[in-house]
Image: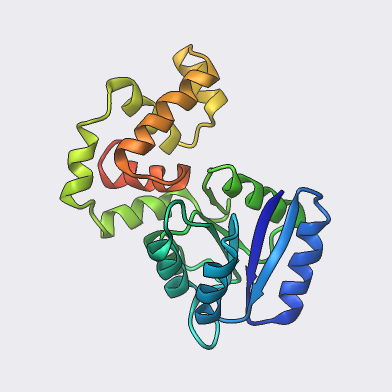
Amino acid sequence: MISVMLVDDQAVVRAGFRVILEQAGDIEVVAEASSGSTAVEVARRTNPDVICMDVRMPGGDGLAATRQIVAEASGSPPAVLVVTTFDLDEYVFGALESGASGFILKDCEPEDLVDAVRRLASGQGLVDQAVTRRVISEFARRRPAPASDAAAAYQLTARETEIVRLLAQGLSNVEIAAELHIETSTVKSHLGRAMAKIGARDRLQTVVWAYQNGVVAR
């Protein structure tokens, strides 16, 4: 069962999300919060698998809360799915910079929200289709990789680098396997080792890292 925490200042939005998610059968909403500051405290107590986080709320914004939750986590932090009505680049940049694992718009279809939660719970990142890879490329251009990240790039094998590059180009594990004529399980193994070397928690942060470090052309 995937445990989820809902963070939004509008009770009606939280109620709607709760109904959508719990109807899925494999998702349980274990906590709610109406502000960023409250979200930090509740996340400490409940340690959910996924947090659906609004951006703009009174009493503390969602990006600051995301940054604090990710920084304070002992072990693997909850995967944060930023859910917002705003698709402005700066909000996406802020979500990526804060350590969010996914970004989706509030006007998405119910099944898209359920799918996003499942993807994040399984360690996959997600960016709404309305937010293209151009945004990630621009984010990387504005915020170059630190020296430590650049050093990590040299630790990747040629195969790991190739798989990360294809991932950043938007290919799934199955598509990468077909492209390289290897098994899907082999792709997963190489990608897992690459993520451990560069310190990426999920696929989305791996893609960001790839753009920042020139593994894929911007």
Across and down, in percent, residue 20 comes to 79, 60
Residue under the image location 28 percent in, 47 percent down:
212
Q: Nearer the viewer, residue 132 or 12?
A: 12
Position of residue 184 measured from the top left corner of the image (x, y, whole percent): 54, 20
Q: Would you identify the image quadrant in which residue 165 lies?
A: top left
Question: Which quadrant would residue 10 be assigned to in this image?
Answer: bottom right
Q: Is residue 65 visible?
A: yes
Give x and y (percent) for residue 162.
Answer: 35, 25
The answer to whether 94 is drawn above or below residue 182 in the figure is below
Tell me: 173 left or right of 10: left
Q: Residue at x 50, y 32 (%)?
A: 171
Residue drawn at the location 63% of the way across and 51% of the way down: 116
Could you say which is closer to the camera, residue 194 or residue 173? 194
Give the mark count: 0
In the image: residue 77, left or right of residue 16: left
Residue 25, image x and y in percent? 81, 49
Q: Quadrant of residue 85?
A: bottom right
As drawn, the residue found furthest toward the top would be 181
Which colour style is shown?
rainbow
Q: Nearer the viewer, residue 122 or 159?
A: 122
Residue 98 seen from this side: no
In the displayed structure, 55 sits above or below 75; it is below
Above or below, 96 against 84 in this view is: above
| Quadrant showing the C terminus | top left
Say which residue appears at 60% left-offset and 59% top-offset. 48
Q: Where 180 falls versus 213 (above or below)?
A: above
Q: Residue furthest bottom?
A: 59
